[in-house]
Amino acid sequence: MLMPSRDVESIFLQPGSLAIESFRPATLNTLLGSCVSFVLVSKQHQLVVVSHMLLPTTEKPNDDEPAKYVDKTFSLVRQYLKRSSIPENCVEIKLFGGGEMFKTSCPETVGMRNIEMSHKLIDDYGFRLVARDVGGPYYRRIQVDLKDGACRVDRFHVALSSRRAT
């Protein structure tokens, strides 16, 4: 069980953020609803990358907050790995989030679209998916141990209610 000691730095990852960290004694935390987060780990390179993505894609080619989007974030991380000479087969990836936050008549929720885009890019880029906890009527608290990339996921049930525009 991951629980930070009082001597270990604890970092909160805001929505639309990306953290690239070397192994060190610290924890990184985030909260997910319909957003998705991946934790990419290269033990060989002592690297942990954690994202918190809000939407599957953007139409803006030069968006000033690319880490908000699944497609842009995966592209940024892939570019970083190439610049750092880290092959995709040297990393493991874990995927979390994409919960259903509201009852809706729409067949595809934002969470579902985030999950689908993440799975597509994981496959396209050749990353090895080693763990996932996605979908369902849950929000999640994610805690990542930066000394090795181990993850703890706490799920909380969402009482789905209809959301009405007023």
Image (tube, rainbow, N blue to C red):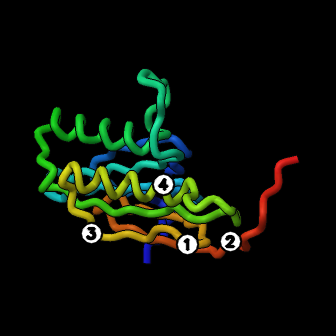
Q: Earlier in the sequence, mark 3 or mark 1?
A: 3
Cα gap from disc 4 to disc 2, whole angstroms? 19 Å
Q: Earlier in the sequence, mark 4 or mark 2?
A: 4
Q: Residue at x 65, y 75 (%)?
A: 157
Crowding near the residue tagged with mark 3, few <14, some 14–19, many ≥20 C-alpha atoms within 10 Å: few
Crowding near the residue tagged with mark 1, few <14, some 14–19, many ≥20 C-alpha atoms within 10 Å: some
Q: Mark 4 = which residue?
A: 113
Q: Mark 3 = which residue?
A: 130
Cα gap from disc 1 to disc 4, whole angstroms? 13 Å
> Residue 166: x and y, percent?
88, 47
Q: Residue at x 63, y 59 (%)?
A: 106
Rendered image quadrant of residue 31: bottom right
The answer to whether mark 4 and mark 2 are in CB contact below 8 A is: no
The answer to whether mark 3 and mark 2 are in CB contact below 8 A is: no
The amino acid beneath tag 3 is Val
Q: Earlier in the sequence, mark 3 or mark 2?
A: 3
* Element type where label 3 sits in the image: strand
Crowding near the residue tagged with mark 2, few <14, some 14–19, many ≥20 C-alpha atoms within 10 Å: some
Cα gap from disc 4 to disc 3, whole angstroms? 20 Å
Rendered image quadrant of residue 163: bottom right
Image position of 103 (left or right of 142): right
The answer to whether mark 3 and mark 1 are in CB contact below 8 A is: no
Q: Nearer the viewer, mark 1 or mark 2?
A: 1
Q: Mark 1 = which residue?
A: 136
> Residue 57: x and y, percent?
45, 40
The amino acid beneath tag 1 is Gly
